[in-house]
């Protein structure tokens, strides 16, 4: 079974721009969660989607948003990029009735 | 408020010996715990998990112990191998809340010396 895939793997943007990251979960997994990893804050939960609905959101500003499609693929969007948004963005998928999340390789976002 | 803590930023052990990584949590609602292994610029790889109804779970060289009264869990790796060198994260969730949210510790960097 293929793992979680994320595109693109690397991205360079400038302040004020917006960015969209994509995540394809493991086949059969319907829950997708997003996390941000930075050296200072570690791995922080952004939000989780199940059946195209956001079930939970972490403590991030409204510039961070996401959505999930009917095939369980998910996208996250960051608008008006700031330097502090530079991070590794990780997507994880799970079967909702199971509790283990499996992570993709991440998207490294650099904001200049 | 850091609900999951890994107080040792780094650990160095000799190949063949036991590695013990520790994790403490504060939220008594957590009922599912996981350990992940991570290399730089890659996503975390799931290693092993434990439910709060158990106190031990084994998978090959990896064993996780849970002490609910102390709100403490540990990961034992026996025997340690150089390929185990990586950052290890413990994570916790409140499964009953159905939020799909994992709370991670800050990580422990394990170095296994040949």
Image (tube, helix red, strand yellow):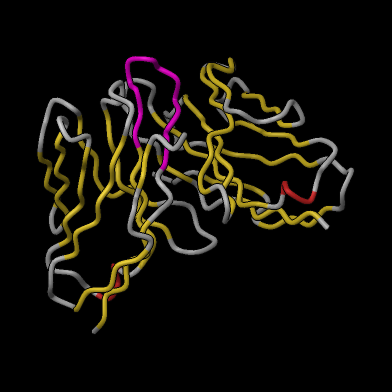
Task: Tell me the residue at 42%/28% (across/down).
Answer: A28
**Residue A106 at what x, y percent from top left?**
57, 50
Task: Tell me the residue at 65%/51% (across/down).
Answer: A87
- Count all numbered tags in the image, as a single digit: 0
**Residue B109 at what x, y percent from top left?**
37, 64
**Residue A1 at what x, y percent from top left?**
38, 44
* Depth check, front residue: B79 or B7: B7
Side of A75 relative to B92 (left or right): right
Side of A96 relative to B49 (left or right): right
Is B95 contained in the magenta span?
A: yes
Up the image or down, B64 lies above or below A32; here it is below
| Image quadrant occupied by the C terminus of chain B | bottom left
Is A54 contained in the magenta span?
A: no
**Residue B112 at what x, y percent from top left?**
27, 75
Up the image or down, B59 lies above or below B99; here it is below
* Depth check, front residue: B104 or B50: B104
* Depth check, front residue: A72 or B71: B71
Task: Tell me the residue at 59%/39% (across/down).
Answer: A23
Side of A61 relative to A58 (left or right): right
Outermost right residue = A16
Outermost bottom residue = B114
| Part of the protein shown in magenta | B92-104
The quadrant in which residue B53 appears is top left
């Amino acid at each position: 079974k293929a793992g979680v895939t994320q595109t693109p793997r690397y991205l360079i943007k400038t302040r004020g721009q917006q960015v969209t990251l994509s995540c394809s979960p493991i086949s059969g997994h319907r829950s997708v969660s997003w996390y941000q990893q930075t050296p200072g804050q570690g791995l922080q939960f952004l939000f989780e989607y199940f059946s195209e609905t956001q079930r939970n959101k972490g403590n991030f500003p409204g510039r961070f948003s996401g959505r999930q499609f009917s095939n369980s693929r998910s996208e996250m969007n960051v608008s008006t990029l700031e330097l502090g948004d530079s991070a590794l963005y990780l997507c994880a998928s799970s079967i909702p009735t199971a509790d283990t999340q499996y992570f993709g390789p991440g998207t490294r976002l650099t904001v200049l | 408020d850091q609900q999951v803590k890994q107080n040792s930023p780094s650990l160095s052990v000799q190949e063949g010996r036991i590695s013990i990584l520790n994790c403490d949590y504060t939220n008594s609602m957590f009922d599912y715990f996981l350990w992940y292994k991570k290399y730089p610029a890659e996503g975390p790889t799931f290693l092993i998990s434990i439910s709060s109804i158990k106190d031990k779970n084994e998978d090959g060289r990896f064993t996780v112990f849970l002490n609910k009264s102390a709100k403490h869990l540990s990961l034992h790796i026996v025997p340690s191998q150089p390929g185990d060198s990586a950052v290890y994260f413990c994570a916790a969730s409140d499964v009953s809340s159905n939020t799909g949210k994992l709370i991670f510790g800050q990580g422990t960097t394990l170095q296994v010396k040949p």
